[in-house]
Each structure stands twice: as structure tokens, then as C-alpha cells.
């Protein structure tokens, strides 16, 4: 049965055997490990993963592809939008201490998926994703460069990341109009716990006007919340390392409970 790629799902199916083999070797799946694949599509990556794991859970929104995948008794198929998935429930159902996550993410919603997974990083051993090359560059970018932004700070707070493998358009059918890359994301053991809503609002405010000094954006946001600590706002957002944003959020989170509650409410 042939399957026509659906634009509304951002479907581009990986078909290059050498690239598939390189991705599987990078993931290094082991028998018995609990793994979840997002967007298995035509199972190009699914089958070699399954051969090594023994069993695999997949999340597929396309009902035709989900029906095809259910023909394999070793696959648990969750037919759903990944943005609606409660990952702790999957961890509990798989009876695993932690799960591994992988997938060729739909490029049109890749950033929302990354942010959806962020709160559940404590339940995840590692993540390997195929993404648009520019997105991976933003994820792994250091300060003081054009690619460094909100995505960089939010993800670098919680993950150590590595740009593993470039993937050209011709590795897909149909070929996308962009180049791709595979990234490895390993949750940090020694991260600073933060209220996610507060941290997200802080970083979003900082990068809301990249060309202006932070005193015009984040500085006013801090003043409105009565922040009395020290933070140099005579810089642009892209000049501040992720660690300083984390430290600032930690200071805000240490304010009296009523103030923290107000800050979190303002982020909603």
C-alpha cells in the first residue's frame, strides 16, 4: 500500500539507508530499553530500532500510518497528537525508570514539541531528533551569535546537546526545501530547578526586542516586579549566557511566596 505524504502533517519520509544506519548507531538502542518514537511514518527508522530493542512505542497522528503500524505486534501504537501526550503516563505504563525518545519531528511544529517535552526531562534518559538544520543550530548556539535566542537558553538550561549528523534533502521522499540535522539531547543531572512558567516568561521578555538593550525590556519587567538584586541590563539579550538567565530566575524564585505566585500568574 502506497502512502501519499500529507502536507498538513509536514510529512517527509526518510529513505537513505546510510543515513538511517548512522542514526541508529548514534542512538545505540539496546534490547529491553524503553523507547518512544515520535512520528514513525513509514517505519524507516522504526524497524531497525525494533530489531535491536525487541519492543517499541510509537506516536503517530496519521490514522492510515497508525493502522499500518498496528500490523506489527511488537509495536505499541499511540494514535494521537504528540502535543497532547502525557509522557509520565507512558513512563508508568512502560514500567521504566526513564525512557528514551527519538523521532523525525514534523518541522512545522518541532519547536512546540521540544517545549512540550521540556517539563518531563526528568523522566527521559536521552532524546535523538531529526530537525531542520537551522533549528539545531539555534538549539546549540553559544551566546553572542545570531542563532542564540530563546530556544537556546530554554533548552541549554535543561539539556546537554550535540549536533550529531547533517542530513541533506535528498535523504527524504519527498525532499524538503531545507537541510536537516540530527541532535542528541541529554537531560542535565546538575541543573538548577526553576518554575518553568517564570523562567519562560523571563527569557521570552529578554528576547522580545533583540536589537534593544535589556534595560528597555527585561529591565522594566524586573522593575515592575520589585526585583532589588543586581543584573546588568546594559547588554543585549544575545550577549547574556544561559547560566546568567538561570541564576536570575533562581533569584526571582527565591522571593516570598506571594511574589513568586504573582510572577507565575503573570506568565500565564
Image (spheres, rainbow, N blue to C red):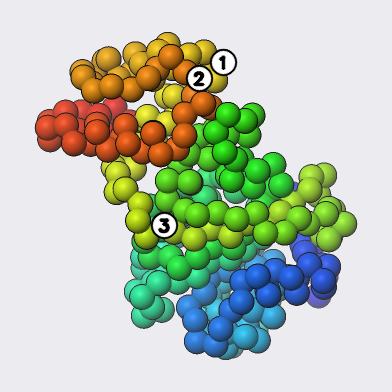
Q: Where is mark 2, residue-wise? A: 236
Q: Earlier in the sequence, mark 2 or mark 1?
A: 1
Q: Residues within 10 Å of mark 3 (few under 14, many from 20)?
A: some
Q: Quadrant of residue 120?
A: bottom left
Q: Where is mark 3, residue-wise? A: 188
Q: Where is mark 1, residue-wise? A: 211
131 to the left or right of 15: left
- Where 181 falls versus 135 (above or below)? below
Q: Earlier in the sequence, mark 2 or mark 3?
A: 3
Question: Are the residues flagged by discs 3 and 1 in contact, CB closer than 8 Å?
Answer: no
Q: Residues within 10 Å of mark 2 (few under 14, many from 20)?
A: many
- Where 75 falls versus 81 (above or below)? below
Question: Are the residues flagged by discs 2 and 1 in contact, CB closer than 8 Å?
Answer: yes
Q: Which residue is at a point 16% across and 28% down the rendered structure image?
A: 259
Q: Earlier in the sequence, mark 3 or mark 1?
A: 3
Q: Which residue is at a point 30% across and 44% down the rendered structure image?
A: 194
- Where 31 falls versus 28 (above or below)? below
Q: Which structural element holds mark 2?
A: loop
Residue 189: x %, y % from top left: 37, 60
Residue 82 visible in the snapshot: no
Q: Which structural element holds mark 3?
A: loop
Q: Which residue is at a point 33% across and 18% down the rendered structure image?
A: 221
- Where 186 falls versus 261 (above or below)? below
86 to the left or right of 30: left
Residue 51: x %, y % from top left: 65, 86
Q: Which residue is at a point 68% across and 74% down the rendered structure image?
A: 24
Spatial distance from mark 2 to mark 3, Cα to Cα?
27 Å
Amino acid at each position: 500500500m502506497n502512502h501519499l505524504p500529507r502536507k498538513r502533517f509536514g510529512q517527509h519520509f526518510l529513505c537513505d539507508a546510510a543515513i538511517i544506519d548512522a542514526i541508529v548507531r548514534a542512538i545505540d538502542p539496546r534490547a529491553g530499553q524503553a523507547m518512544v518514537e515520535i512520528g514513525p511514518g513509514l517505519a524507516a527508522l522504526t524497524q531497525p530500532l525494533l530489531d535491536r530493542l525487541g519492543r517499541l512505542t510509537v506516536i503517530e497522528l496519521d490514522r492510515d500510518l497508525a493502522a499500518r503500524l498496528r500490523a506489527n505486534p511488537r509495536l505499541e501504537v499511540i494514535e494521537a497528537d504528540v502535543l497532547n501526550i502525557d509522557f509520565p503516563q507512558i513512563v508508568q505504563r512502560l514500567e521504566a525508570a526513564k525512557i528514551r525518545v527519538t523521532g523525525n519531528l514534523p518541522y512545522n511544529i518541532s519547536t512546540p514539541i521540544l517545549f512540550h517535552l521540556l517539563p518531563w526531562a526528568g523522566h527521559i534518559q536521552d532524546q535523538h531528533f531529526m530537525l531542520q538544520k537551522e533549528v539545531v543550530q539555534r538549539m546549540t548556539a553559544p551566546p553572542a551569535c545570531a542563532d542564540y535566542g530563546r530556544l537556546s537558553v530554554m533548552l541549554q538550561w535543561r539539556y546537554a546537546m550535540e549536533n550529531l549528523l547533517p542530513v541533506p534533502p535528498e535523504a527524504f521522499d519527498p525532499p524538503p526545501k531545507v537541510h536537516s540535522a540530527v541532535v542528541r539531547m541529554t537531560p542535565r543531572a546538575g541543573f538548577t530547578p526553576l518554575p518553568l512558567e517564570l523562567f519562560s516568561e523571563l527569557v521570552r521578555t529578554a528576547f522580545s526586542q533583540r536589537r534593544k538593550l535589556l534595560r528597555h525590556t527585561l529591565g522594566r519587567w524586573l522593575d515592575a516586579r520589585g526585583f532589588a538584586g543586581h543584573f546588568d541590563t546594559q547588554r543585549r539579550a544575545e550577549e547574556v549566557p544561559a547560566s546568567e538567565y538561570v541564576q536570575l530566575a533562581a533569584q526571582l524564585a527565591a522571593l516570598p511566596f506571594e511574589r513568586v505566585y504573582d510572577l507565575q500568574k503573570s506568565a500565564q
